Amino acid sequence: MKNLSSDDYVQGVLAGDRVLLARTITLVESNARRHFELAQQVLTQLLPHTGGSIRVGITGVPGAGKSTFIETLGLKLTQLGHRIAVLAVDPTSSISRGSILGDKTRMEMLTREKNAFVRPSPTGGMLGGVARKTRESMLVCEAAGYDVILVETVGTGQSEITVRSMVDFFLLLLVPGAGDELQGIKKGVVEIADAILINKADGENKVRAKAARTEYNRALHYLTPATEGWRPRAYTGSALDGTGIDKIWSVIETFQEKMTEAGTLQARREAQMQAWLHTVIVEQLKQNFYDHSAVQAALPGLETAVRQGTLPPTAAALQLLQIYKTTPEK
Ligand code: GDP
């Protein structure tokens, strides 16, 4: 494949060219230093064209029905004339090769839709790396004209908080479980949700799903809402037969309308971008620090001193930081 210039990427994305969209995301996901700079050039040029979507995060345990839900919702939305991009943050994708979310057979019908773009989770080591790539891919998709971005994740707690920090609206998918109806509350994910969908409310499950909805609504009543001015509620639905899915979408649309009017959405996005800046600074500083040859040379000795109790950890850290600041990199 020939090397593209930043203008080639930008023009391709703005023209809605799917091949170039995919290549731009590959560029953004690359870990190579030389790609990093080019990717940032491309993103800087695309930035004025971003922001025009509703960004929705979706979480739930494996088997809760996330991909079924995304496919059902996605197909409905493409029929309504929307353009949907589906991204994922799967912190396990670098660890287990068959990641929880990465299965290629998922969302088969949606994948074939011309107005849908489905991208598996980037790999990339730590959650921070995966999150950065997904954030940037989201901007690229917006510049390409996708007006609904769905970001899927799967429960480790931290990955949900990470996705919460990049979306407007956060949806928690639950299944009416055996007994422990308030599992999500214990995990702290309910607190960051703007709505809960009790999925699989079909067949024999209907009654249990309704009971779970009542319980969650009661619990939600006592929690501080994740978004100021928005009262999260629990709904029942079936991703499989499609009931309740229109309702969830209308909740998301109402949210977007009200929160845009109140200025909450804009404020949230600005705060998210600012927080992201600081995340990148901390990550880069950390990496530069540990990559620095003088730090690498001094670290083992200081680690030994700390382990043997001859030097307090803070004193050792300050020495290392002094070395980092004062020794020029070779
Ligand atoms: P994910 O791991 O959260 O993405 O879950 P999947 O979407 O792969 O769904 C897991 C299983 O639950 C599959 O066998 C689906 O067919 C089934 N499933 C998903 N949604 C529903 C639903 O609304 N009702 C029923 N009965 N089954 C569902």
Image (cartoon, helix red, strand yellow):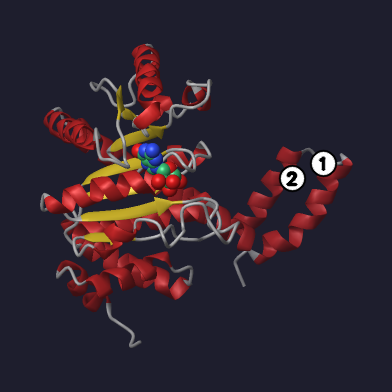
Image quarter in which the N terminus is found:
bottom left
Image side of residue 98 versus residue 133, left or right: right
User: Which of the 4 image quadrants contains residue 95?
Assistant: bottom right
Tally of marks: 2
64 or 14, nearer to the observer = 64
The circle drawn on residue 251 is: none
Q: CA distance from mark 2 to mark 1?
A: 7 Å
Q: Secondary structure at mark 1?
A: loop
Do we see residue 32 in this rendering?
A: yes
Amino acid beneath label 2: Ala
101 or 243, nearer to the observer = 243
Query: Is disc 2 surrounded by few (<14), some (14 to 19) or many (20+) residues within 10 Å?
Result: some
Residue on which disc 2 sits: 316
Residue at the spot 45% in from the left edge and 60% down from the top edge:
122
Report the image quarter containing ligand 1. Answer: top left
- Disc 1 residue lies near ligand 1 with CB under 8 A: no
Rendered view: 216 above or below 155: above
User: Residue 203: image x %, image y %?
Assistant: 35, 31
Residue at the spot 18% in from the left edge and 48% down from the top edge:
76
Residue on which disc 1 sits: 311
Rendered view: 34 above or below 201: below
Do we see residue 163 in this rendering?
A: no
Cβ atoms at labels 2 and 1 below 8 Å apart: yes
User: Residue 278: image x %, image y %?
Assistant: 42, 45
Q: Residue furthest bottom?
A: 2
Amino acid beneath label 1: Leu
Image quarter in which the C terminus is found:
bottom right
Q: Tell me which numbered mark, 2 or 1, is placed earlier along the sequence.
A: 1
Query: Is disc 1 surrounded by few (<14), some (14 to 19) or many (20+) residues within 10 Å?
Result: some
User: Residue 132: image x %, image y %?
Assistant: 41, 54
Q: Secondary structure at mark 2?
A: helix
